Image: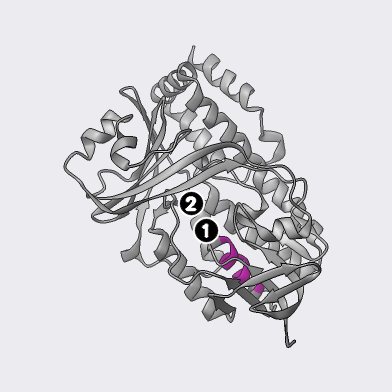
Amino acid sequence: MSSITTDVLVVGGGPAGLAAAIAARQRGFAVMLADHARPPIDKACGEGLMPEAVSALERLGVALHARENVRFRGIRFIASHRQATAHFASGAGQGVRRPVLHGALTERAEEAGVELCWGARVSLAGPQVLLDGRRVSARWIIGADGNNSAVRKWSGLERGGCRGQRFGLRQHFQAAPWGEVVEVYWSKAGEAYVTPVAGDQVCVAFLSPRRHCSAAEAMAAFPELRLRLQNASPLGAPRGAITCSRRLPSVARGNVALVGEASGSLDAITGQGMAVAFLQALALGEALAHGDLGRYCASHRKLMRVPAVMERLMLSMGRHPHLRSAMLSLFSARPFVFEQLLRLHTSPWPASLVARPASAAQAAIVAYR
């Protein structure tokens, strides 16, 4: 049997895998990336890149052309005729269609010299890794193969399962964006995210504990949004996905490391999935350069700490109408509170600033009263 030799083998060619491959190439490693799918690869998501995701892409050398994305300057919460808006302290987010983002990452990986193996079959059998039947000898193996990661199971890093599983549904609409923010609509049924992705298109992503068959069914829980889009035409077919929370005791073992959703996931309510994945990729590249995956494990814990806190706080807002009402009233009456929370949500947080979600919610309600 012939064999393949490389410094780094990345299993999984989504945004996280491509970012990890680029980061490794930036450190001078020979890198192969393998995925059974072929570009362009699409997936249901809110299609909004927070400012730190945009910054991380710049560090990776990924260019998003202005004609293919729409900048947004903040977040607006809307619920029960209340609304509150907060703007990012620095930089802007970008709304971009998932295939466009994947294409930009693929183009950058090719430019950087990553060997891309699309439509390839990766087999994990005992101690061996096979790529289309050929044994791969790699100094490092990176699992970037998503929530149901085969690399995570094969490496012995699988611990526990997903918590709080919810269902997502994405639909694009032919409608000119009506603001420079991502809008988040809240209801007892879940949340709806509206992201501008082109001059004449918006992406609407619904998150709910129950599965919806259509965007029209999901929209019924959001009368303000339904009214806004009553004359807008749906574009293409809706696409669904499952979101959940997963925490792992470790994201590396031996010469194997996990990145992106393979390394643990957040509920999509945070909007931070891409940002976290790109920052993980950069941290992994640094750790590989030092030959020490322990550095990556430490960085990964720090990167996940704050988003996990915000995840629990936002999920609490979703589950408890009285808390949500109090928070929206506070944010509306005192916008600086919302601005500060958004600043924390989109910036690296020192561990000393991270409060328990319950304490954060209680503090907000006390301030409101």
Q: Nearer the viewer, residue 313 or 94?
A: 313
Q: Is residue 221 found left or right of 143 in the rendered image? A: left
Identity of the residue drawn at 43% across and 25% down: 331
**10 Å crowding of disc 2: few (<14), some (14-19), many (20+):** many
Q: Amino acid at mark 2?
A: Pro
x, y (%) of residue 248? 73, 46
Marks 2 and 1 close (CB-CB < 8 Å): yes
Q: Residue furthest top?
A: 369
- Find the magenta span and give its range: 16-24
Position of residue 78 relative to residue 213, above or below, is above
Q: Amino acid at mark 1?
A: Ser
Q: Is residue 151 found left or right of 213 in the rendered image? A: right
Mark carried by residue 175: none
Q: Is residue 217 found left or right of 108 in the rendered image? A: left
x, y (%) of residue 294? 81, 57
Give the secondary structure at mark 1: helix
Q: Nearer the viewer, residue 69 or 120?
A: 120
x, y (%) of residue 244? 57, 41
Residue that carries the numbered disc 1 in the rendered image: 55
